[in-house]
Amino acid sequence: MSTTVKKYTEIYQQIKQDIESGVYKVNEKLPQGRLLAQKYQVSELTITKALNVLVREGYVVRRRGSGSFVKDFQNGNVTKFSPLTGSFSVYDGKVESVIIGFSTEIPDKALAEKLSISEETLVYKIIRMRKIEGVPSIIEYTWMPTNVITGLTMKELETSIYKYISDTLKLKVKSAHVHIAGIRPSILEKSYLNLTDNDFLMSVEQVAYLDDGRIFEFSIANHIPSEFNFETVLIAD
């Protein structure tokens, strides 16, 4: 992990602790980025990265022209996509995985930025087809930093990587930033999911975080519509 990445996670943890302990109260405006940068002796970019994690986890909200404010983080009504436990748990174990690709690679600049790592850090690249009750339903493309998710093997790929993360690595999955869109299938997806050019998929792009603020996964999961369900609660700040 680079010094910059380590530093912003330390600052994220400290501000989070200050919010939870009441140093910063609900609805209180946080100090400006410049002042926080001076306090922690880092760049404003590092402060922005730390605040971005707090925004995604529901501790902070940005108000245009006004600054960053502490949210009511104890309010249980938050926006969610699905339990952050992976497809195996979401579908109650009725999932069979077909491993299409599993390798390590050097990330390009865009992927390194998604994962908040240096371009020298190796990542796992995983491509899986998921069958739900025997029906080919999802193609998953996943990238994970090898220095965060260590020791990954084919065994975990065939069942649940998220279970391995929690049970073996003793890491806690905390939150995710999700983007959903409808797309046309690629050649690979048409082949594995038995689709044509006239079909479409629901594509879920996700950046997932551990409770210490580190990003451990960037993934794209392309679902056939009949096996895709999205439910959320929207709350005004």
Image: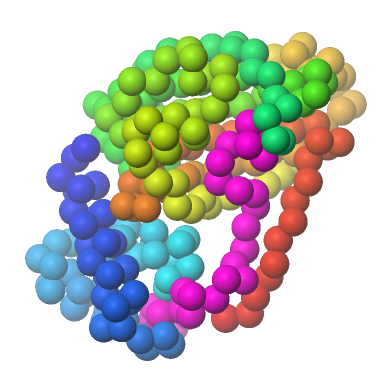
> Which residue is drawn at the image coordinates 87% and 28% (left, top)?
199
In percent of width and height, residue 115 lies at 38, 39
The C terminus lies in which quarter of the figure? Answer: bottom right
In percent of width and height, residue 34 lies at 21, 74
| Residue 41 shows in the view | yes
Left or right of 102: which side holds 221? right
**Viewer-side residue, 198 vs 90:** 90
Q: Is residue 81 magenta?
A: yes
Left or right of 236: which side holds 9? left
**Viewer-side residue, 141 vs 79:** 79
Which residue is most to the left?
41
| Residue 183 shows in the view | no
**Viewer-side residue, 105 vs 26:** 26
Q: Is residue 19 magenta?
A: no
- Vertical relation: 63 (above or below) 224: below
Which residue is most to the front?
167
Number of numbered tags placed on the structure image:
0
In the rendered image, which quarter is residue 124 located in?
A: top left
> Which residue is drawn at the image coordinates 80% and 31% (left, top)?
224
> Which residue is drawn at the image coordinates 40% and 80% (left, top)?
70
The N terminus lies in which quarter of the figure? Answer: top left
Left or right of 110: which side holds 206? right
> Which residue is drawn at the image coordinates 55% and 46% (left, top)?
84
What predominant SS class does the magenta segment belong to?
Answer: loop
- Vertical relation: 148 (above or below) 57: above
In percent of width and height, residue 228 lies at 78, 40
In percent of width and height, residue 29 lies at 35, 86
Give the residues drawn in magenta, as a range: 62-90
In the rendered image, which quarter is residue 171 located in?
A: top left
